[in-house]
Image: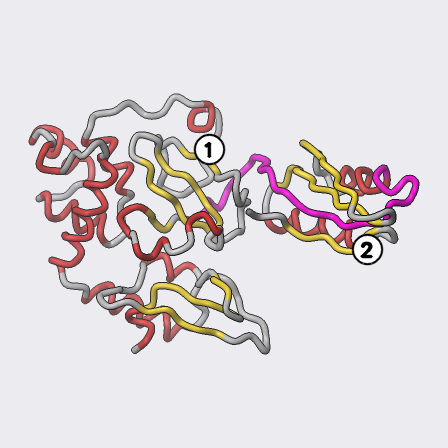
């Protein structure tokens, strides 16, 4: 079954997130790799009950040795500075086993390998590091499930917002850097599974994110004023705006603005798109 060894997809010859819906007429290419296995995060977006049941069955039947070995690689990378699980004092391991209600180190590694425990969270606990005291982690609920106490930053190259398909780059000592799945800067991440991990947005996020859009519009008097008014009317705030003149009649505006999620961002872009002076509007990533 091709799905058993799937690691990614291309649609119309371009990298395409597995979690993103297809539209009619698109050409799909599935990328496979020997030894690849289904990811537990797929359960969050597969559509058919048959596919969901297949994934659950394969994860359940995954050889314990495979999950332990994968968990060991993930955890060794998350520990950073060349450290390995064998360098961790036994008392730290025992304390983490008690916290996770597990019996052995292999049980812990299997949980990490199966995606039931975040490697960066387990690594922080094993190193006995205090929880991050950054503003992001102390003054509000973190927007990523299961990442309590972990430093999280959002990549400025692709500026993901809630609702986007995302992947986390594991940066030892720096926590998680969240990218959009289609970000060019992490292209080919499937080949280095120990450096990346599947993550999910939390269901209850109460904060604004910064997104960037590109607007091509006619250089008419009052056009920019109307554009900023439309953004404000959509309950968004402009953080920065840069314009480039393409010719005497048209210019591009690169706008960074606030959005609570992908839905609000789509609504903002829809309001801009119907303005008489606007030629096109698109999300600017990379």
The image quadrant where one finds the N terminus is bottom left
Q: Where is 125 relative to 146, above or below? A: above
- Which color scheme is applied? secondary structure
Residue 217 drawn in magenta: yes
- Residue 42 on image: x %, y %: 38, 61
| Mark number, residue 274 | 2
Q: Where is 51 relative to 197, above or below? A: below
Q: Nearest the camera: 265 or 181?
A: 181
Residue 214 drawn in magenta: yes
- Residue 28 on image: x %, y %: 48, 74
Disc 2 + disc 1, Cβ < 8 Å: no
Label 1 crowding class (10 Å Cα cut-off): few <14, some 14-19, many 20+?
Answer: some
Question: Does label 2 or label 1 sit earlier along the sequence?
Answer: 1
Q: Quadrant of residue 47?
A: bottom left
Q: Which residues are magenta?
A: 200-225
Q: Quadrant of residue 35?
A: bottom left
Q: Is residue 152 left or right of residue 286?
A: left
Q: Is residue 41 left or right of residue 27?
A: left
- Residue 165 on image: x %, y %: 48, 53
Asked which secondary structure carries label 1, the reply is loop
Report the residue at 58% width, 38% height from top. Answer: 209
Label 2 crowding class (10 Å Cα cut-off): few <14, some 14-19, many 20+?
Answer: few
Asked which secondary structure carries label 2, the reply is loop
Q: Is residue 77 left or right of residue 144?
A: left
Give the CA separation, mark 2 to mark 1: 36 Å
Report the residue at 70% width, 51% height from top. Answer: 267
Q: Where is 54 relative to 257, above or below? A: below
| Mark number, residue 141 | 1
Report the residue at 16% width, 34% height from top. Answer: 83
């Amino acid at each position: 079954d091709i799905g058993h060894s799937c690691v990614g997809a291309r649609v119309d010859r371009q990298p395409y997130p597995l979690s993103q819906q297809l539209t009619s007429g698109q050409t799909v290419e599935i990328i496979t790799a020997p030894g690849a296995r289904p990811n537990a995060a797929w359960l969050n977006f597969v559509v058919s009950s048959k596919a969901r049941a297949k994934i659950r069955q394969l994860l359940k039947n995954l050889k314990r040795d495979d999950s332990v070995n994968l968990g060991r690689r993930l955890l060794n990378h998350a520990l950073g500075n060349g450290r390995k699980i064998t360098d961790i004092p036994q008392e730290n391991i025992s304390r983490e086993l008690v916290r996770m209600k597990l019996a052995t180190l292999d049980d812990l590694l299997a949980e990490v390998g199966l995606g039931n425990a975040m490697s960066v969270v387990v690594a922080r606990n094993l190193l006995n590091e205090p929880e991050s005291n950054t503003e992001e982690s102390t003054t509000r609920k973190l927007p990523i499930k299961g990442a309590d106490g972990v430093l999280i930053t959002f990549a400025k190259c692709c500026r993901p917002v809630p609702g986007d398909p995302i992947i986390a780059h594991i940066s030892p000592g720096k926590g998680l850097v969240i990218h959009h799945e289609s970000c060019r800067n992490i292209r080919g991440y499937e080949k280095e599974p120990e450096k990346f991990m599947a993550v999910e947005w939390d269901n209850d996020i109460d904060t604004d994110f910064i997104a960037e859009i590109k607007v091509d519009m006619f250089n008419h008097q009052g056009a920019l004023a109307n554009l900023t008014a439309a953004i404000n009317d959509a309950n968004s705030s402009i953080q920065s705006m840069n314009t480039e003149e393409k010719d005497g009649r048209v210019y591009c505006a690169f706008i960074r603005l606030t959005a609570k999620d992908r839905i609000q961002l789509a609504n903002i872009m829809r309001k801009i798109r119907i303005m008489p002076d606007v030629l096109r509007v698109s999300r600017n990533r990379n």
